[in-house]
Image: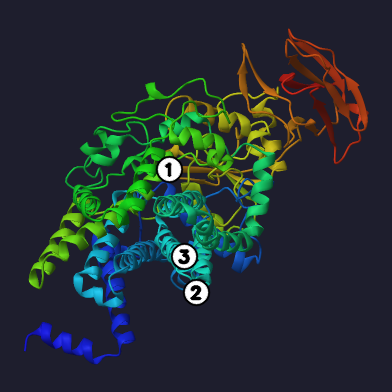
Amino acid sequence: MTRRGRNFRIARSLPEGDAKGLVHLAVLLGYLALTLVMTWPLVANLGAAIPGDGFDGWQNYWNLWWLKTALVDRLATPFFTDLLYYPTGVGLYFHTLNPINGLMTLPVQLSGGLILAYNAVVLISWTLSGYGMFLLCLWLLGRGDGAESSAGTGRRAAAFVAGLIYTFAPFHMAHLLGHMQVMGVQWIPFYALFLLRGVEERRAGRAWLRDGLLAGLFLTLAGLTDWYFVLYLFLFTGLVLLVYLIATAVKKPSGLAGALPAVLAPPVVAGAVFAVLLSPILIPMVKEAMQYSFMVRPVSDLYILSASLADFLIPNRLHTLFRPESFAWPGNQIAPVSERSIAIGYAPLALAAIALARRGKRAMLWAAGAIFFLLLAMGPALHAGNITMAEVPADLSLGADAPGWTPFAALNRWIPFMRISRSVSRYALMVQFGVAVLAGMGLHTLLQKVHGRGRAGITAAAALLVLGEYWTAPYPLSPPDTPALYTQLAQEPGQGAVLNLPMNYDRPGYLLYQTVHQRPLTVAYISRDDPRTMTERAPFLQHLRHLGPDILSVDPAGAGMTVLADLGVEFVVLDRYKMPGGEERAVTEALAEAVFAGHVPVYADERVTAYRVAPGDAQPYIVLGAENWGPLEERGEALARAVSGGPACFTVRHADGVSAAAIRYRTAPDAEAEPVTRCGVDSARLPLAPQGKLVELDITCGPRHDDAVELCLEAGAPGSLWVEQIGLIEQ
């Protein structure tokens, strides 16, 4: 007897449930094994390195560490941390925290360490992404075919290949470079499965509530992974409702009124589950989004991070045979590689074309979805070829609407929270999602026409073609490159903060180092810079961040040591490996040299130099308040900050010996109301000054707290007051 015959007899001898279980186990193991192959040599370095380019990966590495630190060590919420931007701390609601990945792999982290936990996220995501698509296609291909008996028509084989297309797509593999939150695409097919099944069951008058509840659960898991996914699934749900209602109206117009509740019930239940489970996170997010606009990126980002049609149609940029030359191929020329590696693949497109030709109505939803999300991924301007900086409008301010009437531009106006998402090309995920389903349908059509070995041959050929197009091994790996200094700092007594230099650009490597020394960081790398942190408000830090003065007229070198001491900084570390040339190096090294002149480093090697903060005589300086100061902007020939939304305050620290604050301001040419100044409980009005004016405000009028005095300015009307400089007058 042949091996196939023996296996057939074994399968038949098993109870039906056990046989199905073995099939699903084999599918899961198949996706896991192929993940190890496609990410090689990761499997040989599971405890030694993480996949990627050594940039954003360390941010997500820190996310895993912080979640454990917050929940296990501190028994506190993970959505706020005082370990970043110390001492004010910073909220993490709009940070790419992806807490579900940290929760799933917490046992791995506690027992095997951070690197192993990070790689466990990868293996789980790729395996479950394939399996979720397998289940979705298995159900879709079984509708109307006589239940489980249709497995013999190649339904499982087609569904398995669809899973390969979804999980090993260039989109998914590109974000393995470091975007852990985008890796977690596994919940999307599970949501779609239970949403669609719930709708079908509800329309047929069968039990559907369980499916609606499960759809809500997977929508919640998607939200705990990446808020982008929630937006995508809301749009997908709207598309599902539209397609079902159109189909009903065409078939039986009179039945539209009765069809509406049937179609709406499952998504309403799913949305309710999502809202209830995530309300502790959603409520503060909505409040913060309504009050502040810093999480909204400039409209220019929407152009830089959008997709060209060419990006979908060219071969895989990450393919081993093509890189690095492929990075210069037609398409988006200005976005990072991870954001423009969205090729669909020719084999999946060919299979999808078969589905469109032979499956008709059953393919309509997925074809419409793929086209809709492709148009969204192209952003505010549709490009067939290259996207360059010349295509990016230079005069679009923060929070402005994207011009034009592309699908993205229109929805960006109508859906408020779309403005928070800046990586427009990531809508390509849903294009790949739709194509994977269509490809599964197309392959199933082919398999129904052959039998026996022919069916196995076609399945193997399709799988090999897909994997061949998507091949990326050997995938780059990044072992942790942590200077020995940070191990030494971990052994030092106390918990004083660390200021890493340079600091004017985002560097996630500092987050990696924190997982070793575990001290607070004065500055950090998060998804959305928060202007309420001291980085934007205190002298010396402002100079290091922006490589020049802000509106505070304070000698950054003279006040630097005092500022550092007041902020609880114990060590300042200069990292020459992270120090670029030009202005950044010149400004950073000059300020550090001036502040620490005559101080002996506590550590120095060819890479880093560390100084211990040694406060001397306190020097007076000014700190901007956290609220109602606009961003630093060029205003004519001067830099200025707008005062808007309420009192914009500033504090004079170490005010002994200071008699007054000198403020140079300018009012709008058409301003009618006079600006207001407050000192303690007193108020006075400043005169209109469209040409600019310098005034002195007595700081002795307000109450002092720990040798500090607070003064506040308030605009008489929105956009009427700009402050160009605030200085101190000593007695």
Residue linked to disc 2: 207
Q: Residue furthest left?
A: 1
Please name the residue shown 62% across and 40% down the image.
530
Mark 3–mark 1 distance (CA, rounded to whole Å): 66 Å
Q: Amino acid at mark 2?
A: Ala
Mark 2–mark 3 distance (CA, rounded to whole Å): 10 Å
* Mark 3 Cα-neighbour bin, 10 Å: few <14, some 14–19, many ≥20: some
Mark 2 and 3 residues: CB-CB less than 8 Å, in contact? no
Would residue 647 be visible to someone looking at this image? yes
Figure colour scheme: rainbow
Which corner quadrant holds the C terminus? top right
Q: Amino acid at mark 3?
A: Arg
Q: Secondary structure at mark 2?
A: loop
Q: Is residue 533 above or below residue 454?
A: above
Residue 77 in the image: x percent, y percent? 65, 60
Q: Residue 203 got which mark?
A: 3
Q: Secondary structure at mark 3?
A: helix
Camera-side mark, 2 or 3: 3
Please name the residue shown 8% across and 71% down the image.
453
Mark 2–mark 1 distance (CA, rounded to whole Å): 65 Å
Q: Amino acid at mark 1?
A: Arg
Please name the residue shown 27% across and 60% down the image.
162
* Mark 1 Cα-neighbour bin, 10 Å: few <14, some 14–19, many ≥20: few
Residue 515 in the image: x percent, y percent? 52, 57
Q: Earlier in the sequence, mark 3 or mark 1?
A: 3
Mark 2 and 1 residues: CB-CB less than 8 Å, in contact? no
Q: Secondary structure at mark 1?
A: loop
Q: Is residue 390 above or below residue 90?
A: above
Mark 3 and 1 residues: CB-CB less than 8 Å, in contact? no
Residue linked to disc 1: 607
Residue 226 in the image: x percent, y percent? 49, 53
Would residue 484 be visible to someone looking at this image? no
